[in-house]
Image (cartoon, grey):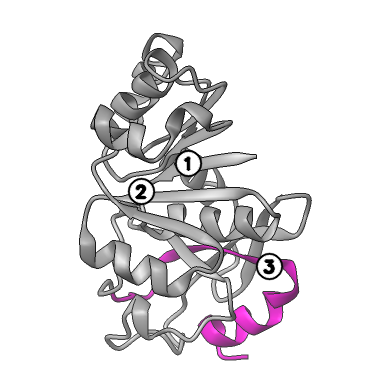
Amino acid sequence: MKIVIAGAGNVGTALAQDLSTRHHEVSLLEQRPDIAEKAQQALTGVSVHVMDACEVNSLRRVGLRDADVVIAATGDDEDNLVLSWLAKQEFGVPRTIARVNHPKNAWLFDEMWGVDTAVSTPALIMSHVEEAVEVGSVIKLMDLAQAKLSLLEITLDDDSPVLDGVMVEEVELPRGARVVALVREDQVVTISNQTSFQAGDHVMLIASSEFHDAITAVFCGR
């Protein structure tokens, strides 16, 4: 399948790499040149384009009319809605998937805006955080991609090796593993490479199922 993903953040990049390894033709769109360059360096088999995913002419150049699936995975709900609408109305893309960043906007993500499937990451995370979670342990929340990937949660204790100013970009994760979200004091924190960790943080990662023990060592020290 030809899949177009907008947004080269942690979520978009992780999706792009996984879909590419499954032999799909993947194009990743990112408006910021610096982020696009980092994504291009990190990814293999993925075509990265520096462009505004909300501009019709840009979408024409990337061949959106031939896409089987469009994934709007930016950190901006308005951009995700606009792309979904354009994909459906202007380009006739068969399937659209849109990321909902702020739960208060979830009601907008429907067929009227061209959204076939809406994925609310904060809502998903919070539903699991509310469950009993053992501090200082890695918990598998769910299997993804036919159980080849897992969504993991680690609640950091006071002795975690990643405290004391360690930033996301400094954490040595297994290949393909990515921090995708962080919950602090019941609030979803917008993460970047410079985000640092605090005791009590709920860290969410997507990783290959085989790396459970390695991730435990990184975040829990054992």
Q: What residue would you read off at disc 3?
A: 208
Name the foreground residue: 184 vs 32.
32
Dot 2 crowding, Cα within 10 Å, few <14, some 14–19, many 20+: many
Which mark's residue is nearer the viewer, 1 or 3? 1
Q: Give the residue drawn at x 56%, y 71%.
A: 177
Label 2 residue SS: strand
Numbered range of the magenta stretch: 196-222
Tell me if mark 3 has few (under 14), some (14-19) or many (20+) residues whose alpha carbon lies within 10 angstroms of its own.
many
Q: Is residue 139 left or right of residue 36?
A: right
Discs 1, 2 touching: Cβ within 8 Å: yes
Label 1 neighbour load within 10 Å: few <14, some 14-19, many 20+ = many
Residue depicted at 45% across the width and 44% down the height: 5
| Secondary element at tag 1 | strand
Which residue type does callout 1 highlight?
Answer: Val
Residue 133: image tag: none
User: Residue at position x 39%, y 13% from top?
Assistant: 89
- Which residue is label 1 attached to? 4
Amino acid, disc 3: Ser
Decide which of tag 1 and tag 2 comes sooner along the chain.
1
Residue 6 position in % (x across, y down): 38, 44
How far apart are the two marked residues, 1 and 2, measured between alpha carbons? Answer: 7 Å
Which residue is most to the right?
146
What amino acid does circle 2 point to? Leu
Return the x and y of residue 127 as percentages of the image width and height: 53, 41
Residue 181 falls inside the magenta stretch:
no
33 sits left or right of 172 in the view: left
Residue 199 is inside the magenta segment: yes
Q: In terms of secondary structure, where does tag 3 sit?
A: strand
Q: Name the disc covering residue 29, or none.
A: 2
Contact between marks 1 and 3 (CB within 8 A): the answer is no
